[in-house]
Amino acid sequence: MIGRTSRSGEALRHAVLILGALVVILPFYVMVSYSFKSPSEIATNTGGFFGAQQQMVNEYCVKLGNPRDACLETPMVYNYTQAFKKAPLLRYLLNGVIVTASIFLIQIVIALPCAYALAKLRFWGRDAVFAMVMFCLLIPVHAIALPIYIMLAKVGLTNTYASLVIPWTISVFGIFLMRQFFMTVPDDLIDAARMDGMTEFSIVWKVMLPTAIPALLAFAIFSVVAHWNDYFWPRIAITGNRELYTPPLGLREFKGDADGSIWGPMMATATIIVTPLIVAFLLAQRRFIEGITLTGMK
């Protein structure tokens, strides 16, 4: 009876997990499928996953006023080529790499020493400082966006890379995550490093950093995904310089055309933007899970 109940509970858990996975995957399925289809197939939701590629080639010729035999691109090829022709997508992708990499590297430079001090050093007010870090986790980004923008505008940093990077250089989540990981590192390892004459900063970068690689990879996934996909802040900070658009802002180049003719290139652009994140997560999946797991150990 007990075994039957446990099997029923396990089957229910699996059913819930499968349902949740389908809910998460469905938008990605629609995005990729629409990037392969022609406007009429998107409007009528027909054509299967890839669409009737050869049958719908002439649809674009009619729209563009070209002879039927002059149109050689299938909707799949057309959507992805338009993603690069209609907007400087490579430039936007490069901006995304510059911004996310800069933010992450500066966050690490700041978070590691702070986390080490909160985890391993004894000083007056340490618990109060950690309580402030926890409190900062509760402050939504939208609540401080206007003061940050006014500050950057007064020093003339809007419409620059600095305006995209500076507000996020201190990550309280990164400090919290690394602090929790450093709590799992034995004190004997740190004491041995001190006996060898290493300074506290040397211990951070030569002892703690190598041990924290799993946690760093976990934090990297959170940081890169958050800032690569961020639309809210770049939309505020970058108002007139199209050359500084990040990938999400690049999607604005495909707005308009109520007949749906722009949806295919838009979905192709979204697919291109999302693909690097998916590849990076799949490559770092094991370390990511390990990093998240170890931060909860003591």
Image (spheres, rainbow, N blue to C red):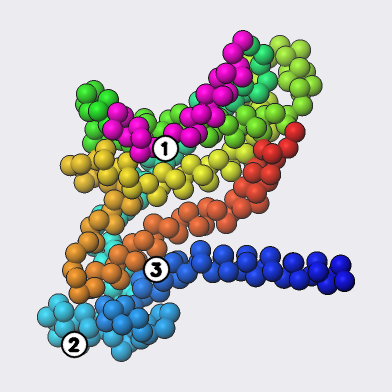
Closer to the camera in the image, 1 or 163: 1
Q: CA distance from mark 3 to mark 1?
A: 29 Å
Question: Mark 1: which secondary structure?
Answer: loop
Circle 2: element type: helix
| Depicted 244 relative to depicted 43: above or below | above
Q: In the rendered structure, find residue 68 and report the number of the disc placed on it.
A: 2
Identify which amino acid the numbered label 1 is placed on: Pro
Q: Nearer the viewer, mark 3 or mark 1?
A: 1
**Numbered circle sitting on residue 31:** 3
**Label 1, on which residue?**
140
Q: Badge 1: few (under 14), some or many (20 or more) residues near its Cα, within 10 Å?
A: few
Crowding at dot 3, Cα within 10 Å, few <14 / some 14-19 / many 20+, comes out as some
Question: Nearer the N terminus, badge 2 or badge 1?
Answer: 2
Q: Which residues are magenta?
A: 124-148
Mark 3: which amino acid?
Answer: Met
Measured as percent of width and height from the top left, residue 132 is found at: 52, 24
**In front: mark 2 or mark 1?**
1
**In the rendered structure, which disc, 3 or 1, sits on the residue that comes first in sequence?**
3
Work out whether 233 lies above or below 61. above
